[in-house]
Structures are given as C-alpha cells and as structure tokens.
Amino acid sequence: MSTITTRTRSRLRRLQKLHLAAAVKQEESYISSFTIENDEFVEEDDIIKQITFDKCSQSVLSITNFDEPLQIQHQYPIPKLGEHDILIENKAVGLNPIDWKGKKYQFGIYHFPWINGRESSGIVVKTGSNVKSHEFSPGDKVIVSSTSYRDNRTSTFQQYTAIDSRLVWKLPPKFSFEDGATIGVGLVTAGIIFYNSFQFELTEHPAKEFTKNESIIIWGGATVVGLYATQLAKLHGLKVISIASLDHEIYLKELGADIVINRHLSSQEIKSLALAFSTNIKYGIDCVSKDTSTIVLDILSNSTSIKPLFSGIVGLPKQDIPESVEIRQVVIKEFHENIDYGKQFVNITTHFFNNHQIKPVRYRHYQGGLHIIHDALNDLEVLGAKGEKYVVSI
C-alpha cells in the first residue's frame, strides 16, 4: 500500500476548507484507497474523482410564465454532466440586457420553467468522466460563459451550472469572483468579432505592424462588449475611436481608446470628428442599435480604407448599406459549436489575463443571493449599464 502524495493531500485540505457542498471523505479513506493493482498504483486522477457530490437538488431563479414575476424554485434538479462537463457552484453572476428583455418582450424563452443567466464565476464541485484532474478538479475557481442559449443546464441564475470544461477559464489568482463574472459573453462576443468576423489571428503575440496605420470605430464604447473590444483592438495595434458618453472618457482611455467622441452630438458632427482623427478607418463595430449602425456604416463608407469591414451585434439597417463596406456577421454560437476555436480562445485570453493585457471591466455590485437578481435586473432596465457590468454575488 502506498502513501498519498503531497499534492493530493493539499487538494483534499483545500476542498475541506472551502466547505464545498460535497461529501469529502476523511483523508484516511483516501490513503486506504491506494492499492497495488498489477504492480501499479491507482492513478491520482481516479483518487480525486472519488470525491463525491451528494446533492440532488438546488435553488434556481426561474421564469414560470411571461406574465408572472421571477420565482425562486427550491428542490430543482441539479444539471447532469456530459463526459467533458464540469459542475460549478456559482459564486457571482453577471447580468445582460437579454435577461430582462427576453421575458418582457417574450423571445428567447423556449419552455417553462426557464432559467436565464449567461455568465458566472464559481467553484468546481464535480467533473465529467473525461475531465482529467490536471485540467479541472473539485475546488478549482473558474469563469463561465454560456453561449448555448437553449440549454438550461448551462444557465447561471441557479446554484449550480454544468458547462463544457474545454470552454471554461480558470480564475486568475488576482481576480475576485465578481471580476470573473464580468468577462463571459462580453469578451466572447468581442472575440468572435475580431477572430471570426474580422479574421484577426488568434495568437498570444498579436502582430501590430500590419495595423499600425489603421483605425477602428466602436459605437457603444462603454458597453461591456465595447470595453473588451477596445482592449482587443489595442492588442492588435489599432487606433480606437470610441463613441460613448463623455462621462466614461477617462475610463475608456485607460483601456486603450485614443479618442472618445460624445454620442450625444449630431451624426454629422460625430462623422466629422471621427474622420478628422483618422481617414483610414478599416473596421467598425456597433453595439447599440440599427440606427447607430447606419451612422457607423456611413462613416466607414467615407474612409480611405479599401473595403472596410463592419459588424453589428444588435442588427443591421434594412436599407442604406453602402456597397463600399463589407458586412461581417457576428456568430456567437461559434464559441461552443466549434470546440477547437472556443478552447483556443480560452487559452489565448487566459494568457492575456495573466499578463495584464486584458483587464476585467468595472462592475456595479449586488449582494444577497439569487433573489437579488430581480432587483438588479430592474435597475439594469431602468438605469442601463453605464461603463460597467452588473454583478450579483450569490
């Protein structure tokens, strides 16, 4: 019989200190579980997987009817895991406008009860059969972005979320759970635009010599997508023209914006200021509306750049699309449907986090658990997100 490794001992102690909702057996039982089989010791992965998660139900914040308020449901089934999945105990969740718009305008909800929530951070409590301990183990702190909108197992307005481990970030040591909850869909969407729509190279060392004289215009620079798009743009050597409220000018410039143009100006004034800053505007992103997309397209059509590229995350105008501008669709589902891309994106952006090249965005903080999400969503609808992410600690 062997002795348990120091690495395994430390993991077990860490799990016990975290007070996970898992039945962690006493260390002696792990030691006794090391047996010699065919002159070989049992793999440590197998020992770690003997940590059992004994809960069968959880609490969720659900939509039971379009006309009824959000409800806390107890004794709700905990999501089942696929072979590559991990189960995460959510500690902080991020909110998005779709979380209130879907219910209010009755779209994107496919059955009742329905669970919203697209991003969170938390602690791994269980792993699927094909997840190795060097990848993820119970006790690891992680970041979740769910783009599988029809799969409620991956929703985050619940105590436990199941997600494909290959699409999960480990929470950087200096990030709080609240920092982690700001990342999710905002960074994924910005990444899809840059690496799928605009076809930038997804690499740890972005080449800047090809873009040093080019600019990008971002309408909605203070939206969460805009904040992460600004940071990615600077990593790739672009000059950033941000259209936003001047209330956020200092913050946007800290993240990399070269110029912030007041969104309250007339469209002609905005166009004149943008083209005065740079005539070579190669890329355009709109994060706000079809109307503002029209203005961005007009600015791009007056750029000296040959065939500038445009992506809009809200929608395109039905008319007035200049022939000189190439429209690139934003296909969010690429993140989870193309596992190779999603995994590479997670790995590369982890490198950016650890090297302080991408920062988590500011957040408006709510505390008190799942039931506080209702109040936070009301504020998000009425007040809007102003250069920040709405985050609820669970």
Image (cartoon, rainbow, N blue to C red):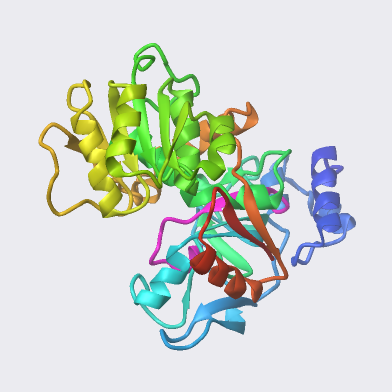
Query: With respect to residue 98, does 27 lie above or below?
Result: above
Query: With respect to residue 275, does 336 lie above or below?
Result: below
Q: Where is residue 260 in the image (x, y as percent from the top left)?
A: 46, 34
Q: Residue furthest left?
A: 323
Q: Over which residues does the magenta segment extend?
A: 138-155
Q: Which residue lies furthest to the top in this view?
A: 209
The front one of 181 and 259 is: 259
Q: Is residue 142 visible?
A: no
Q: Where is residue 105 in the image (x, y as percent from the top left)?
A: 35, 75
Q: Where is residue 293 in the image (x, y as percent from the top left)?
A: 27, 46
Q: How many labels does the image show?
A: 0
Residue located 37% across and 25% down the image:
201
Query: Quick check: is 149 in the magenta stretch?
Result: yes
Residue located 59% across and 83% down the image:
73
The front one of 310 and 20 is: 310
Q: Can residue 179 be seen in this view?
A: yes
> In the displayed structure, does residue 16 sit left or right of residue 312?
right
Residue located 64% across and 69% down the image:
159
> In the displayed structure, does residue 268 sit left or right of residue 111?
left
Query: With respect to residue 55, does 183 lie above or below?
Result: above
Q: Where is residue 174 in the image (x, y as percent from the top left)?
A: 73, 38
Residue located 41% across and 76% down the image:
103
The front one of 348 and 364 is: 364
The front one of 278 and 238 is: 278
Query: Quick check: is 280 in the magenta stretch?
Result: no
Q: Quadrant of the C terminus?
A: bottom right
> In the displayed structure, does residue 319 sit left or right of residue 300?
left
